Amino acid sequence: MRSGGSKVVLFSQVFAGLISILALTITANYVGAKTFGFCSICILVLNIVIALIDFGACSWASREYAAQSITFGTYKNIMWSKTKLNLSLALFIPVFFIEPSREYRFAFLLLLYPALWNRSNYIQQFLLARNLIRESVLLVILDRICWLLIIPISVLKFDKALAYAFPIIVGLILQNILFNIILSREQLVDGENLDFNQLELFRFSRHFGTISITSVISNFDGVLVATFSSIADSSSFLLAQRFRNPLTIVFSSVAMRLRPIAARKNVKSIKTALNYDAKLILLSVISTFGIAFFLLEFSEMFLGPDFKDSGVILFFGVIGSIPLGVLILVSSLLSSMGEEKFVAKINSSYSILILSGVALGTFLNGSLGAVAWVLIQSTIYAGYVSSVLVQKLKPARS
């Protein structure tokens, strides 16, 4: 690990997270509840498609590359095979130019999202496996800065669906371009390059695939809220959901940094790395509480009347990102340590419960009931998987 690598990750990712929240707030205010809800649901649907197409191949390949079990050439072959499959979604572009989707026709740009996002995931995993931490966080920051294109777009009064989709796609394209520049400067020692077919990849990555699919399915809670209320009424919950990634970004970054260490299954090294990052995680938790109270007080001022009860919903949604972040971090470590089958079972039960619980919460008390259920369930699961990790890290009895 480079000296100060964790601090670089933390402060750059916090910066990227703040940019994300700012950009999302401006976007929500400009495009309105209806367009924001429609495009957010499109992203949710595309995320499940990405998970089905990749089916854990990225997580498996990055673990094997970090453990030096496969070469970069093999890793790159896997990445390209999945990129080509995701690009096939562009065939559905004409759907956005016929009724009833014509109102959101510029959302067709989101069909480029699966291929670009999936490649971005491979890129990030490769950079972290190579210990190129500064390069990794630089790409994330530049990607999020592109989200601020919403400012000139809103000033120029561009189409609302275009305003939502364009900054996201530009950021991902920039990541891919810069990765090729970084790669050209790296001296990679390669060995035998393998070219797996999709069936072989499925066999190797099936447990990781279950984890990724169940994780994405659990994000369909936003669709359920929209189903039991309306797209406009669910907009505050969907906005809280979009805040999840920026607010768990420190946990995700620590997880990605520790994944190569966990893949080597050296308990002492894992515990040392966790202790090293403990203060950074604590700072993230304190910052999250600060953001939650700020949104409770001022969110309705920024978002306007379209987003009903946004203050209290965003408050609980933001607080819920803490146990969710813990769950992401611990599950990632357990998977890297070879416990992906256990994590797959946990994720499956989590997804089933979160969807049924959110549906019940929405029925009883709208978006507020839904976000409260997410907070309670994620807290329980985070506590359980953390206790399992603690047991795994205990020294073996002689």
Image (tube, grey):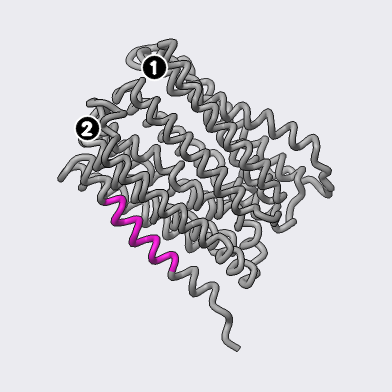
| 114 or 95: nearer the viewer | 114
Give me the C-alpha separation between circle 2 and circle 1: 20 Å
Graded by Cα atoms within 10 Å as few (under 14), some (14 to 19) or many (20 or more), the crowding at tag 2 reads some
Tag 1 secondary structure: helix
Amino acid residing under circle 1: Lys
From this viewpoint, which residue is outermost toward the left?
Answer: 364
Q: Main secondary structure of the magenta part?
A: helix
The percent coordinates of residue 319 (x first, y second) are 34, 50
Span of residues in magenta:
373-386
Q: Image height check: is 4 above or below 292?
A: below
Q: Residue 118: name its quadrant.
A: top right
Amino acid residing under circle 2: Lys
Q: Quadrant of the C terminus?
A: bottom right
Residue 95 visible in the snapshot: no
The mark that comes first in sequence, 2 or 1, is 1
Residue 237 visible in the snapshot: yes
Tag 2 secondary structure: loop
Name which residue lies at 45% across and 48% down.
248
Graded by Cα atoms within 10 Å as few (under 14), some (14 to 19) or many (20 or more), the crowding at tag 1 reads many
| 109 or 160: nearer the viewer | 160
Q: Residue 41: name its quadrant.
A: top left
Q: Image height check: is 221 above or below 163?
A: below
Name which residue lies at 33% across and 62% down.
380
365 on left or right of 203: left
Q: Which residue is mark 1?
A: 160
The percent coordinates of residue 255 (x first, y second) are 55, 54
Name which residue lies at 48% across and 34% down.
19
Q: Which residue is mark 2?
A: 308
The percent coordinates of residue 148 (x first, y second) are 49, 26
